[in-house]
Structures are given as C-alpha cells and as structure tokens.
C-alpha cells in the first residue's frame, strides 16, 4: 500500500538521521553509593544551586533527603520541587520552571522514575528555549542547549537517563506530547543500587518489563544495527536472570545493580533503533486509563510479538539462542523465546489482561495507536485497524 511506503520512507529517514547525528551518552556512575560520586562531580563542575525534581513519595520515604544531604555536604544548595505526578503534565513543567528562575538555580537534578526524569528534561529545555512545550514537541526542535541536567533513576525500567526523549501530557486531554532531541540526554547519571532496594516487588516487576520491552522492540526493529542488537541482547540476558531475583528479594544489591545496567543498555538500544507497536499501545492505554507505563507494556508485549511472529522469527530465534547459550538446537527457537517470556511473566506476576479497557473506546484507541506507531516506529509488520482491535480485545478482560 502507498501509505505503507510513506511510513517506511519516514522511518528510514529516522534511521539515516541516527547514523549521521551524534547521540551523546551521559557520564555514568554506577554501583552502591554512586549518588555521592555524582554530587561531587556536579560540585566539581562549578554549579552552585540545584533544582531537585522529584515526587512526593520519594520525599516521604526520605530518599530525597538523602540526595539533599549528599549535595549539601559538597557545598551545593538545593531547591526542592516535588510536585511531579505519574505522566507529568505541562503545568507541572511550568511550575518547576518558575521555581528554577525564582530561586536562581543553575542546574537541575532529577530523582525518580521516568516521570521525574521526563519532567526535568522538559524543564531544562524550557529554561533556554523560550517556546511553549507544544512548539518544542516532535523531532529535533530543542534548538538551544538545555539547562545542565543530572539524573538519579530510582527504578530500573525507563532508560530515560540515556535517551533523547521526554514525554509530558496535555493537562486536559492527557494526550502524550513527546520531545525527541539529542540535547535532552542528561550530562551525568548515577545508577545507585542503594536507592533501589526499597522499590516494591510489583513496581520492580513492571518497570523491569518496561526495560525488557525496550530491548526486545529495539532488537526486532527494522532500524536495528549491530551495536543496538548487542545492547539489546545484553539487557535481555540480564533481565531474564536478575529480574526474578530483584522481585523476590528487593535488598539483593547484585540483582539491583544488574537491573540498573540492563535498563541503561536497553535505553542505549532503543534510542538508536527505536520502538514499536507495544509502546504505541502502552502510551495510549496509559493516557486513556491511567495504567502505569510498565504495566501497559506488559499487557501488550506478548500479543504484539505473536502478531508479528511471521516477520520476526529469525530475531526471536537469535534471542532464544542468546538465552540458552546454544545455536541450531530445537529448543533454541522463536517459539522457545515466547515460552520463556510467558514463564517470566508467571514468575514475577505480570498481568496479561486489564478490566480497565472498555470496548466502547476501541475505535478511538485503534486510531491513536496506529497513528503513533506508523509515523514514529520502524515496525517489522504493519497492523491494520481490524488486527489492532483484535489485540485490544485480547488485552481486555
């Protein structure tokens, strides 16, 4: 179909851009206690006052205070902005931006999951780009270098510490507004396992599936490269081994460290290779029903892989071989990878259906999902409206 050729042409253009444009990586501090290495580095760079972007939950459990104390011990002043909510909206960005200017801050430090980091990225962009968020949305529209941004992820899933993307929502419609620009990559990040040990098992599981989805979609992407495939395989192997351990025992420092690195590798993979239908489903289910992003990815991943199976069988076979350590054996098959994924779901309690989905919303969701996927993601197999509706029916209880 002509429109499929148009979609392919557009995503091929994105692939070419990924080859030509430099994709920066943050300076990375990892391991237990790396928070302190990060705050010391920020002070060494000469910054004086940080806007700490986080959420109220991390304030209540004392995690934000740990970061503030570490910063102050190194001579940094900290202004706390803790109004970030899941799926942050424009008004949260503008409130944080006002606080940044009113307090005389010279850098931003994000503490939290994807919501805090995305909100901080857009605040940083707005500091130097005096344009509305809508005018910054889309590809390569952040013209001026954002305010200096540093991040401390408190989940192992989003990969936002290394990606060129940030997503915020319109406050009224809750439609997602993605900003994608290499300038949004943070300067530095700390993957501190000590800050991950208190993460509840359910959130650990869902955010781990988010990281897995990033790695799998990057691997099966038509824009995958040798290096993105290597990062994807590294992330997938770590997740299958260490996510069940992190869910079972949140205080397992080794498992937390490995999951943090898995999320980082997956972020490196999809930043260049892009994503696919799973994320188109997840973004729109999240916007419509408030389903957390990792959980929404969990709902869509298996159905999308089964739908795409005929076009991705070699890639799934390669993933099965990577997990089993064998090549050419019957068990190292594409279907084996699907079975392994089903077993992982069962082991860590990932839901495969949701009672929140309403059949009356199918038409609207189909339109939004296909629009997002076809104009943004190099999917291996195109889905039509009827097929998309069928997958939604599979997810709906």
Image: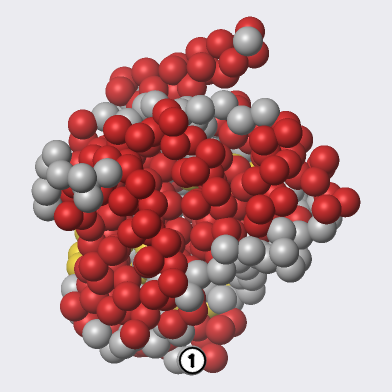
Q: Residue at x 28, y 59 (%)?
A: 262
For the N terminus, the image quarter is top right
Q: Where is residue 29 in the image (x, y as percent from the top left)?
A: 21, 65
342 or 270, which is in the foreground? 342
Q: Is residue 131 left or right of residue 200?
A: right
Question: Quick check: can you spot residue 181?
Answer: no
Residue receiving disc 1: 61
Which residue corresponds to the image point at 72% horizontal and 32% vertical from the top-left?
385
Residue 199 in the image: above or below residue 277: below
Furthest toward the front, the residue is 330
Residue 145 or residue 257, whichever sits in front: 257
Q: How far across and down, in percent of the image, does residue 256 sit? A: 27, 76
Q: Report the residue that reaches farthest toward the top.
A: 2
| Residue that appears at 53% across and 56% down | 297
Which colour assignment does the render follow?
A: secondary structure
Judge whether 324 appears above or below 130 on screen.
below
Label 1 crowd (10 A; few <14 / some 14-19 / many >=20): few
Circle 1 — which element?
A: loop
Residue 281's spot in the image, x, y percent?
62, 47
Q: Horizontal and vertical percent for residue 7?
A: 57, 18
The residue positioned 82% from the left and 58% from the top of the image is: 358
Q: Relative to 309, is 28 on the left or the right? A: left
Q: Quadrant of the C terminus?
A: bottom right
**Residue 100 vs residue 171, the one in the foreground:** 171
Q: In which quarter of the image is residue 317?
A: top left
């Amino acid at each position: 179909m002509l429109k499929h050729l148009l979609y392919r042409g557009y995503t091929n253009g994105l692939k070419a851009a990924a080859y030509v444009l430099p994709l920066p990586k943050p300076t990375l501090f990892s391991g237990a206690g790396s928070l302190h290495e990060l705050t010391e580095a920020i002070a060494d760079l000469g910054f004086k006052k940080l806007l700490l972007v986080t959420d109220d939950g991390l304030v209540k459990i004392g995690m934000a205070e740990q970061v503030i104390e570490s910063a102050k011990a190194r001579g940094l002043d900290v202004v706390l902005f803790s109004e970030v909510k899941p799926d942050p909206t424009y008004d949260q960005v503008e409130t944080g931006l006002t606080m940044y200017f009113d307090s005389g801050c010279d850098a931003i430090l994000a503490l939290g999951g994807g919501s805090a980091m995305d909100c901080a990225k857009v605040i940083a962009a707005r500091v130097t780009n005096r344009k509305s968020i809508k005018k910054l949305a889309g590809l390569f529209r952040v013209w001026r270098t954002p305010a200096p941004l540093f991040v401390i992820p408190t989940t192992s899933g989003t990969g936002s510490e290394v990606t060129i993307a940030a997503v915020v929502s319109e406050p009224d419609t809750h439609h997602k507004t993605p900003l994608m620009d290499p300038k949004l990559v943070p300067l530095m990040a700390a993957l501190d396992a000590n800050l991950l040990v208190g993460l509840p098992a359910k959130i650990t599981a869902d955010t781990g599936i988010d990281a897995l989805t990033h790695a799998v979609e990057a691997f099966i992407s038509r824009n995958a490269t040798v290096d993105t495939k290597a990062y994807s395989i590294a992330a997938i192997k770590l997740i299958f081994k260490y996510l069940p351990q992190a869910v079972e025992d949140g205080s397992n420092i080794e498992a937390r460290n490995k999951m943090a690195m898995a999320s980082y590798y997956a972020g490196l993979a999809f930043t260049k290779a892009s994503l696919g239908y799973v994320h188109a489903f997840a973004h729109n289910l999240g916007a419509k029903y408030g389903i957390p992003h990792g959980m929404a990815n969990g709902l869509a991943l298996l159905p999308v892989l089964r739908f795409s199976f005929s076009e991705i069988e070699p890639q799934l076979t390669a993933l099965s071989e990577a997990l089993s350590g064998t090549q050419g054996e019957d068990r190292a098959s594409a279907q084996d990878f699907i079975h392994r994924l089903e077993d992982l779901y069962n082991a860590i309690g990932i839901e495969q259906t949701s009672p929140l989905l309403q059949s009356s919303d199918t038409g609207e969701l189909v339109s939004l999902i296909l629009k997002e996927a076809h104009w943004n993601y190099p999917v291996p197999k195109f889905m039509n409206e009827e097929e998309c509706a069928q997958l939604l029916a599979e997810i709906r209880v």
